[in-house]
Amino acid sequence: MPTFATIVLKNGKDHSLRRRHPWVFSGAIARVQGEPAEGEAVRVETQAGELLGVGHYSGGGSIAVRMLDFGPEAELPTPDFWAKRLANAYALRQRLGLTGTADTNVFRLVHAEGDGLPGLIIDVYGDVAVVQAHSVGMYRARPDIAAALQVVFGNKLRAIYDKSAETVPGHTVGDAKNGYLFGESSGHEHLVSENGHQFAVDWETGQKTGFFIDQRDNRALLARYSPGRRVLNTFCYTGGFSVYALEAGAELVHSVDSSKKAIALTERNAGLSSHPSATPPTPTTCSPSLKAIRPSTTCWCSTRPRLPSTWAPATPPSWATNG
């Protein structure tokens, strides 16, 4: 039977874990019993030997352990552990109406700490699940995660794609590469549906997992205010906001992005709508374009009772680096 390392906390540093905080900071550690490898599952205990929980160890940063389970009954991850966690996440999405509807087949299955799985993102695009590990522990658990997905979804899943090469700490895993953990590429365009709108999604070479699923409610909100108005969609990427505005009856939609590939994807998605774009998307850098717009015609986030004639949704990339 394998022996697992134990992280012993300093006196008084156990309170956050008793409140189920998902992180153990390096400064809270009194000593490490054993020699845990990066990403290995470890036990976390008090000075008196009380088990507080288990998690993935990371010795190179300020977050030393990302917790997976809490309390004296906590168990180290097994295949059954992963299947239960993913089944719970799926059941929650079903109760919230985020999946299983006639007009939407794209949703986020696992949202890291929010689902008790720090460092893990899983997005579902119809019959394909895209896994993205943001920690070494989750990266090393990919085979178990893929197996659990097949248990939970059965024959509903055609493939499972790993998109972790861009997110897992590279200095700890070597040459990480993206690829299929189960199944293979269909070889043709993959279309998904969100609130009745069709989108072409490219998880293999696109940003993040292929589509910004977390912006679903914001896209629907923009649609409410778009009829008869002009819309400028900056950093448009897949053109999600553009499509919602077009379908809602916007007078005119401009889509701007510095990536020609993103512009091509926006054009494709606009073409899938019933109202093709009134003007072609523009492959240019957004910041200079915004400076050229007359301030009197653009509203970023207005709380005034009178609605402006032009809306400019902006979903820029992260300009802040990890510090």
Image (tube, rainbow, N blue to C red):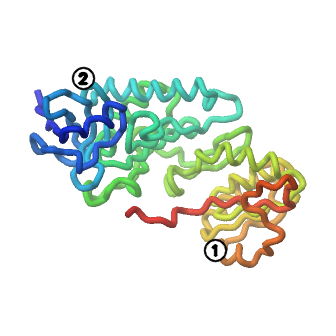
Q: Is residue 252 visible?
A: no
The answer for how far apart the CA atoms under marks 1 and 2 are is 54 Å
Secondary structure under tag 2 reads: loop
Residue type pointed to by label 1: Thr
Badge 1 marks a residue whose secondary structure is loop
Q: Position of residue 10 (x, y in %)?
A: 18, 41
Density class for disc 2 (Cα within 10 Å; few <14, some 14-19, many ≥20) is: few
Q: Determine the image quadrant of residue 44.
A: top left
Residue mark closest to the camera, 1 vs 2: 2
Q: Is residue 301 left or right of residue 320?
A: right
Q: Quadrant of the C terminus?
A: bottom left
Q: Is residue 204 visible?
A: yes
Answer above or below: position of 147 versus 279: above
Q: Is residue 14 above or below residue 198?
A: above
Residue 133 vs 51, above or below: the answer is below
- Residue 73: x percent and y percent? 26, 21
For this view, does 207 lie left or right of residue 37? Answer: right
- Residue wearing tag 1: 285
What crowding class fits label 1: few (fewer than 14 Cα within 10 Å), some (14-19), or many (20 or more)?
some
Q: Quadrant of the N terminus?
A: top left
- Residue, disc 2: 72
Which residue shows up at 33% across the image and 48% down it? 135
Q: Of 71 and 313, which appears nearest the observer?
A: 71
184 or 248: nearer the viewer: 248
| Number of numbered discs on residues | 2
